[in-house]
Image (spheres, rainbow, N blue to C red):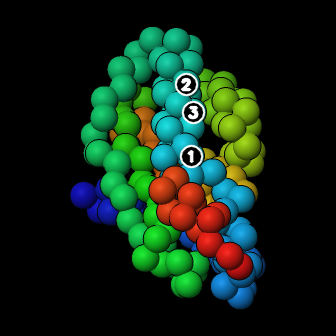
């Protein structure tokens, strides 16, 4: 339970919603930043696709891995885009896990798979959070404040979250309003 709480806190910290300078700027800066970002629907779908590809490629490379959704994704508001706090959203993606672990000698290959797939979706190279025998964890992020976490210890886990985005209906409304 303690580990799950830690993992949830890490996932929430990865959202980094509102950590960019435009989010803390003027209302016009916040508006411009949110309008140039993909909609929450689009970005959530894109990141779910990325997670699916990561899971599939890991399962193909490591046949002992049998992924199971262990926690549903959730929607939340955002902080940092204060002038648009009632309109912007962030999503925590579903958490996937497997009872199978990735042995230490094979961890670099697993990390390489995650790095390669996530880079195709605009994420930074994985940053090591934990690296000790039978316990590994990496995180990555993108320019919108999205993040993922991938690790193996007692089991292998993949989770992630979006940054702050507007629903498409809100983007359409804002785009029609004069600045």
Mark 3 burial class by Cα count in 10 Å: few <14, some 14-19, many 20+: some
User: Residue at label 1?
Assistant: 43
Residue 67: assigned label: none
User: Is 53 situated left or right of 37 in this image?
Assistant: left
User: How far separated are the C-alphas under marks 3 and 2?
Assistant: 5 Å
> For residue 61, what is the image quadrant?
top right
The residue at 37%/43% (across/down) is 95
User: How far separated are the C-alphas under marks 3 and 1?
Assistant: 10 Å
For this rendering, which residue is in front, 83 or 161?
83
User: Residue at label 3?
Assistant: 50
Element class at badge 3 = helix
Element class at badge 2 = helix
The residue at 41%/20% (across/down) is 65
Mark 2 burial class by Cα count in 10 Å: few <14, some 14-19, many 20+: some
Tell me whether the residue at label 3 lies in contact with that at label 2, contact meaning CB atoms closer than 8 angstroms. Answer: yes
Q: Earlier in the sequence, mark 2 or mark 1?
A: 1
Q: Earlier in the sequence, mark 3 or mark 1?
A: 1
Q: Is residue 19 visible?
A: no
Residue 53: assigned label: 2
Compared with 169, 50 (above or below) is above
Q: Residue 77 in the image: state x and y as whole percent.
A: 42, 70
Q: Is residue 144 visible?
A: yes
The residue at 53%/78% (across/down) is 84
User: How far separated are the C-alphas under marks 2 and 1?
Assistant: 15 Å
């Amino acid at each position: 339970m303690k580990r799950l709480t830690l993992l949830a806190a890490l996932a929430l910290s990865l959202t980094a919603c509102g950590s960019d300078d435009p989010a803390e700027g003027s209302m016009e800066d916040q508006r411009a930043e949110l309008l140039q970002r993909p909609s929450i629907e689009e970005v959530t779908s894109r990141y779910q696709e990325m997670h699916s590809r990561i899971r599939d490629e890991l399962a193909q490379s490591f046949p002992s891995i049998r992924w199971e959704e262990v926690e549903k994704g959730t929607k939340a508001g955002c902080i940092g885009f204060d002038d648009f706090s009632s309109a912007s959203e962030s999503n925590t993606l579903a958490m996937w896990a497997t009872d199978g672990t990735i042995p230490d000698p094979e961890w670099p290959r697993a990390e390489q798979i995650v790095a390669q797939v996530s880079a195709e979706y605009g994420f930074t190279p994985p940053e090591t959070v934990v690296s000790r025998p039978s316990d590994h964890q990496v995180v990555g992020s993108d320019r919108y404040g999205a993040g993922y976490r991938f690790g193996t210890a007692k089991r292998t886990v993949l989770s992630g979250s979006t940054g702050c985005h507007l629903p498409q209906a809100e983007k359409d409304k804002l785009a029609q309003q004069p600045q």
